[in-house]
Image (cartoon, rainbow, N blue to C red):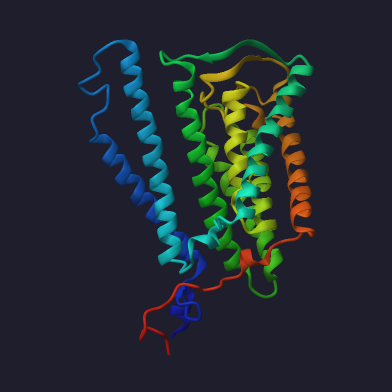
């Protein structure tokens, strides 16, 4: 194999090199996204010819539209990621941090509890300081009942927690760690660099959100570090997925804060009026753009380390994140010589 070919192809692992795997992955995601947009534009929606009936029935059909849109969007991200893992990376799905063992589900429960706890801390601190005022409870701005209206944000944040962690941590961080794991860097330094790069991607992914700023983008970079930490410590996505889901849901639909600048808090258990200094509260972007949110990220990172030590005795980087173990069989007669 020529030196030029070696720039693109790893002859030992029989797969493209990390950079080109990531390029192919981005192109695959773009193609899947275009396909879903085309599919959605051809589906009969309530506001395209049959939005008749009372407000409640129209709202129910619009809710169905929104749920279908969220699920299709999630599939357009999850399925290409699984395809890329199988055919570009030549790895089983479990290597993306989806082992689904008893320990994995235990860690998922911890992540879910942690996200709710951290957002409760943010709410309690702001309430104690008089920076928020509780205006009402069990509020929805939809013609639907409260519980029916809650179906959309619950589905949205469930999907977001899964596909963002699968892509940014499970696929991107892992491929970066493998690709950077060469002498003299070594695996642990490669994992640290991969964490920083993946977090640097995670922040700007939200830069186009309403009310975003350079500050909010930087703080979401810090959130990316928090979410990536348990992946490096466990080689699992259980804690990041659980934490991501409940961090968003409790932020917007339990305590009524804006979620990354969006209005996903239109149905919420507690409706609040935000006050206080924007430097600390994050203002219209939500706690993720404020120093109280950053403090919650620090506390969350410390609790993650505590949990890993409690469940695994020792705490350290799982070098398996940066190690490639080919476990997908190659058809007979295709081995390289």
Q: Which residue is painted at 75% across and 22% down in the image?
A: 124
> What is the quadrant of residue 191 in the picture?
bottom right
The residue at the far left in this view is 49
The answer to whether residue 279 is seen in the rendering is: no
**Vertical arrangement, residue 63 with respect to residue 35, above or below:** above
**Vertical arrangement, residue 6 with respect to residue 264, above or below:** below
Q: Which residue is painted at 27% across and 41% down in the image?
A: 38
Residue 322 is situated, as x and y percent measured from the top left of the image, at 62, 66
Q: In what quadrant of the picture does the C terminus appear?
A: bottom left
- Indicate left or right for 60 with 3 as reference: left
Q: Which residue is painted at 46% across and 27% down in the image?
A: 151
Residue 62 is situated, as x and y percent measured from the top left of the image, at 34, 23
- Indicate left or right for 211 with 16 as reference: right
The residue at the far front in this view is 102
Q: In what quadrant of the picture does the N terminus appear?
A: bottom left
> What is the quadrant of residue 194 in the picture?
bottom right
The answer to whether residue 23 is seen in the rendering is: yes
Count numbered badges in the picture. 0
Residue 148 is situated, as x and y percent measured from the top left of the image, at 44, 22
> What is the quadrant of residue 73 in the picture?
top left
Residue 216 is situated, as x and y percent measured from the top left of the image, at 63, 34
- Indicate left or right for 100 with 49 as reference: right
Which of the two residues, 84 or 333, is positioned nearer the viewer here? 333
């Amino acid at each position: 194999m020529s030196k030029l070919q070696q720039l693109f192809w790893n002859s030992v692992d029989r797969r493209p090199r990390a950079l080109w795997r990531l390029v192919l992955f981005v192109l695959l995601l773009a193609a899947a996204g275009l396909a879903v947009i085309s599919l959605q534009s051809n589906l009969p929606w309530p506001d395209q010819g049959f939005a008749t009936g009372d407000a409640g029935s129209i709202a129910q059909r619009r809710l169905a539209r929104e749920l279908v849109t969220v699920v299709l969007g999630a599939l357009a991200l999850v399925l290409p990621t699984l395809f890329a893992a199988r055919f570009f990376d030549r790895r089983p799905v479990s290597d993306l941090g989806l082992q689904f063992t008893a320990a994995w589900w235990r860690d998922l429960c911890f992540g879910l509890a942690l996200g709710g706890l951290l957002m409760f801390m943010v709410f309690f601190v702001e309430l104690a300081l008089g920076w928020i005022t509780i205006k009402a409870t069990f509020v929805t701005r939809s013609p639907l009942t409260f519980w029916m209206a809650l179906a959309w944000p619950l589905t949205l944040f469930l999907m977001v927690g899964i596909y963002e962690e699968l892509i940014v941590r499970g696929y991107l961080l892992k491929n970066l760690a493998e690709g950077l794991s060469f002498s003299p860097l070594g695996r642990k330094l490669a994992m640290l660099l991969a964490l920083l790069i993946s977090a640097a991607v995670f922040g700007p992914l939200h830069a186009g959100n309403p009310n975003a700023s350079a500050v909010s983008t930087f703080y979401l970079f810090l959130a990316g570090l928090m979410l990536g930490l348990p992946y490096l410590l466990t080689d699992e996505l259980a804690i990041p997925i659980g934490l991501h889901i409940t961090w968003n849901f409790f932020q917007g639909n339990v305590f009524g804060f804006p979620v990354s600048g969006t209005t996903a808090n239109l149905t919420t258990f507690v409706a609040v009026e935000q006050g206080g200094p924007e430097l600390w509260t994050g203002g219209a972007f939500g706690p993720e753009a404020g120093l109280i949110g950053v403090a919650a990220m620090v506390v969350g990172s410390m609790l993650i380390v505590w949990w890993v030590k409690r469940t695994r005795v020792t705490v350290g980087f799982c070098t398996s994140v940066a190690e490639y173990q080919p476990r997908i069989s190659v058809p007979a007669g295709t081995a390289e010589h």
